[in-house]
Structures are given as structure tokens and as C-alpha cells.
Amino acid sequence: MFERWQRLVVRVQRRWTTMRRTLLIWACVFVFGIGCVVVGLLLFSPLAQLREISVVRHDPRVDVEQVARALAPLRKRHLFFLSLPEVRALAEPAVPGLKRIDIDKDYPSRLVVDVELHPLIARLEIESPQGEAAGSGAVSVDYLAADGTYVAYQSALVENAATLPVIRITDWAARPVVGSLLIEPEFIVMIDKTERQLLDQFGQKITTRTVFLRSQEFHLHMATYALWFDRRSPLEEQLQRYRLYLEHAGPTAAAEYVDLRLADRIIYK
């Protein structure tokens, strides 16, 4: 009797092993089939065509509609085959002052574009060769972004518009164009460093700044007179010349300007 039950158990185990292998094979076939269907839908189904472009902005200055228009040629393209560098190449020129752009695919048919702008560091007054203001228009105001890009926005879109410092732009060969690089970042750093050094070392606060684009000079205006600097000479040497001026001529000697650009002499008026 015991041997009979033992043989029965062995037969059941063998059949279960065979059935388990068969079930496992069919399960693999089923999963593979489902995978093929999903891949087929992703690759060839019209459901995976780009139908929605979502622009995430962290600043009201970002023109969502402008970004969407720039990416409009990509609509109806298959999302799977859409190249992210291609998307980036279309989106970046549509966002002046762009700091960062992240692009994600949200299947089956949505593209998410996350845009962040460089902060604004100054309000611009662009002067014509005749000395008249030549802004971008009555509706918008000209600004300088931290990366040196010339941008223009409505004042309502700029939260700190009233507190931004003013930079006059002059001596330009061609009229600056919105969205172009106006002042190189290294030049901006030098101007900012000069202003901080004047405040820290001499206790003098700057009211306005004038940048000469072609000659690469900048004038920093204080309450009584202006200091003339250039980009070619080391900043420390120009500041040292200003120390000599204060020691020998005194702070009241100049009424209009002190020219610190020349290595062999200091000119003031």
C-alpha cells in the first residue's frame, strides 16, 4: 500500500513539473507578445504622435506661446523618434536670456519643456549716436540678463524692475538687437567687481554706468564726477591710479571725470 502511494506521488510530481514548464513557456510567450504589441504601438501607432507641448516656466518673462510656436513644426512627429537635441535647437533661439532648458517625453503624445531664464541685472538705456535714447519700443523696456544678453519685456513682467541698476549703452557700431549678446560676461564681471571695490575700498557708491561697446570702456558715475575705466588695462592698476589721484589731487579736484585708463598719467576735469 505504501509503495502504491509513493508511485502515485512520483507520477503527480512528474506531471506537475511538465505542466509547470509548459505554463512557464506560455507565460513567456504571452509576455513577449504583449511587449511586441506595446513596442509596436510606441513605434507605429498614431497615438504616439506629438499632440501636446507643455511649457513649464519659473518666471513670468517666459513667453509660453513663443516657445510653442517655435516647436510647432514638430507636431504630428512620432514622439519615440523625436530627437531631444532637435527639440533643443528649435526652442533655444525662441528664449532670449535662456539659462536652462530641460526636455522630457511624456508618452504617449506629450512633450514637456522646462525653461529657466538668467536673472536680470540691469535696466538699459541705449543711446543713439546723437545721444538720444533708442529703446526697443514704447511698450517694452530694455534689460540686460546675467549672461550679457539684451532682452526686452513689459515692466509688468519684471518684479524688480524699479530696483535694477541702470546701464547706458553707447558707442555701438550696429544697433543692438534684442536677443543678442550685448556685453560679454567677463566684461560684466569686471564692471561689477570695479563697483564693489570702489564701495569697499573708497566708500563711494555708483549711481549709473555707461558702457562703450566698440572701445570696450566703461564710465562709473558718482554723485560728483565719473570714473573712466577700460577693459584692456588690469583693474588693480586703474584702481591704484585712482588712489594716487585722491592722495595728490584730492576728491574735490574733479568736477566732471577722472580718466584712469592711461598708464603714464591721470587726467581729470
Image (cartoon, grey):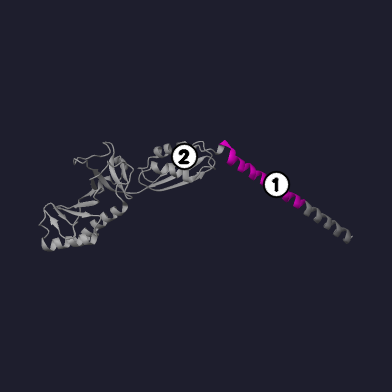
Q: Amino acid at mark 1?
A: Val
As drawn, the residue found furthest toward the front would be 264
Q: What's the residue at 50%, 37% (across, down)?
A: 51
Q: Between 18 and 138, which is closer to the camera in this rendering?
A: 138
Give whichever of discs 2 and 1 has the lower sequence position: 1
Q: Secondary structure at mark 2?
A: strand
- Span shown in magenta: 19-46
Q: Position of residue 123 (x, y in %)?
A: 26, 46
Residue position marked by numbered label 1 in the rendering:
29
- x and y percentages locating residue 92 in the rendered image: 41, 44
> On the rendered structure, is 238 left or right of 66?
left
Q: Circle 2 is placed at which residue position?
A: 53
Asked whether 268 or 60 is in front, the reply is: 268
Can you name the residue that lies furthest to the right here? Answer: 1
- Tag 2: residue type? Ile
Q: Is 42 one of the magenta-colored residues?
A: yes
Within-10-Å neighbours for mark 1: few <14, some 14–19, many 20+: few
**Alpha carbon distance from label 2 to label 1:** 37 Å
- Residue sitting at 86 percent across and 58 percent down? 7
Neighbours of disc 2 within 10 Å: few (<14), some (14-19), many (20+): many
The x, y position of residue 249, in whole percent, is: 10, 60
In the image, residue 268 lies at what x, y percent?
A: 12, 55
Q: Secondary structure at mark 1?
A: helix
Q: Chief secondary structure of the magenta span? A: helix
Residue 14 placement, left or right of 30: right
Q: Give left or right: position of 28 versus 96.
A: right
